C-alpha cells in the first residue's frame, strides 16, 4: 500500500500571500489530521477531518482552514501568510475514527518558508 | 492548563545500554498514550500504543509503561544501537469525544558507538 503523500514537498512564499497544501491518505483511511511543526512549539494539532466533516480544530487563527473530499484527500489553506507560519506541515491518516485508539500514519510533510 | 512534558530535549547514551525516556502530563485524562519516532526531515512513525488500563507494553527491544496515578509514561529501548538515534515523541488523546492527538516536544536520543 502506498503511504501518505503530500504535495508540494517544499514551498517558498512571501508575507500576505496564501498557500494550499495537499494530502492523499493511505487507501481506505477516512480520517485525516493536519499538524504544524516548528522547533519552538513542536507538533501542534491544526484540525482533523472524517468523511468530509471537520471534527476537531486546534488553537489556530481562522487564516488556517481545511477541507476533505469524498475520496478522503484533504487540503489545507493558509491565507495572509505571516513569517511565523514558516514550518513543516504534516498530514496524518488513520483507518478508523480516532479517540486516540488508532496509530496515525504521517506523510513526509510540506516545508513552508515565508519570506 | 494542560501540559505534556518530555523530560529532556536531548539524551546521549552508550551503545548497548538501555535508554529511558519520560513523558509527564498534567490536567489530562487520556485513555491512550502513543509513542512515535521522528528522523530529521521525515514525518513521525508510530511505535507503540498503550491504554490506560495497561501497565506495560512491549515490542521487540521497546517497552512502554503507563502510570495514570503518576501521570507518567516511560519509554525504554534496551540494547540501544546507533540506528536508534532519533527524536522520540509521546502523544496523548484528549479523552472521550476528541479526535486529536496532542504531542510532547520530543526527546532527541543519540546512541554513541
Image (spheres, helix red, strand yellow):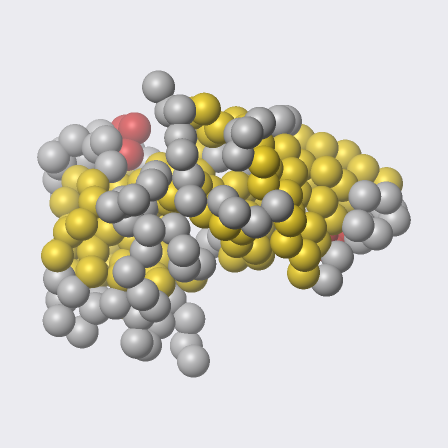
In the picture as drawn, the residue positioned furthest to the bottom comes out as A1
Instruction: Identify whether A12 is placed above or below A2.
Output: above
Q: Residue at x 47, y 54 (%)?
A: B43
Q: Quadrant of residue B98?
A: top left
- Residue B59 shows up from this direction: yes
- Residue B36 shows up from this direction: no
Instruction: Identify whether A7 is placed above or below A76.
Output: below
Q: Of residues B28 and B44, which is closer to you in this image?
A: B28
Q: Of residues B51 and A58, which is closer to you in this image?
A: B51
Q: Residue at x 15, y 51 (%)?
A: A54
Say whether residue A34 is left or right of residue A18.
right
Q: Quadrant of residue A37?
A: top left
Say whether residue B93 is left or right of residue B5.
left
Q: Quadrant of residue A28?
A: bottom left
Give x and y (percent) for residue B40. 56, 48
Say whether residue A20 is left or right of residue B100.
left
Give x and y (percent) for residue B77. 74, 48
Q: Residue at x 13, y 36 (%)?
A: A63
Amino acid at each position: 500500500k502506498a503511504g501518505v503523500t503530500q504535495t508540494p514537498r517544499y514551498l517558498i512564499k512571501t508575507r500576505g500571500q496564501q498557500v494550499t497544501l495537499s494530502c492523499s491518505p493511505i487507501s481506505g483511511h477516512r480520517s485525516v489530521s493536519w499538524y504544524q511543526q516548528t522547533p519552538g512549539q513542536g507538533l501542534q494539532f491544526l484540525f482533523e477531518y472524517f468523511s468530509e466533516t471537520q471534527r476537531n480544530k486546534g488553537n489556530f487563527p481562522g487564516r488556517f482552514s481545511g477541507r476533505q473530499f469524498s475520496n478522503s484527500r484533504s487540503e489545507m489553506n493558509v491565507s495572509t501568510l505571516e513569517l511565523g507560519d514558516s514550518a513543516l506541515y504534516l498530514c496524518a491518516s488513520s483507518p478508523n475514527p480516532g479517540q486516540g485508539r488508532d496509530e496515525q500514519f504521517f506523510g513526509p510533510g510540506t516545508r513552508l518558508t515565508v519570506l | 492548563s494542560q501540559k505534556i512534558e518530555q523530560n529532556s530535549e536531548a539524551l546521549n547514551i552508550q551503545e548497548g545500554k538501555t535508554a529511558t525516556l519520560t513523558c509527564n502530563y498534567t490536567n489530562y485524562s487520556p485513555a491512550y498514550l502513543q509513542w512515535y519516532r521522528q528522523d530529521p526531515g521525515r514525518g513521525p512513525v508510530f511505535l507503540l500504543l498503550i491504554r490506560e488500563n495497561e501497565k506495560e507494553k512491549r515490542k521487540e527491544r521497546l517497552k512502554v509503561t503507563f502510570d495514570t496515578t503518576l501521570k507518567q509514561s516511560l519509554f525504554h529501548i534496551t540494547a540501544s544501537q546507533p540506528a536508534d538515534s532519533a527524536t522520540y515523541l509521546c502523544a496523548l488523546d484528549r479523552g472521550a469525544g476528541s479526535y486529536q492527538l496532542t504531542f510532547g516536544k520530543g526527546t532527541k536520543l543519540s546512541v554513541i558507538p
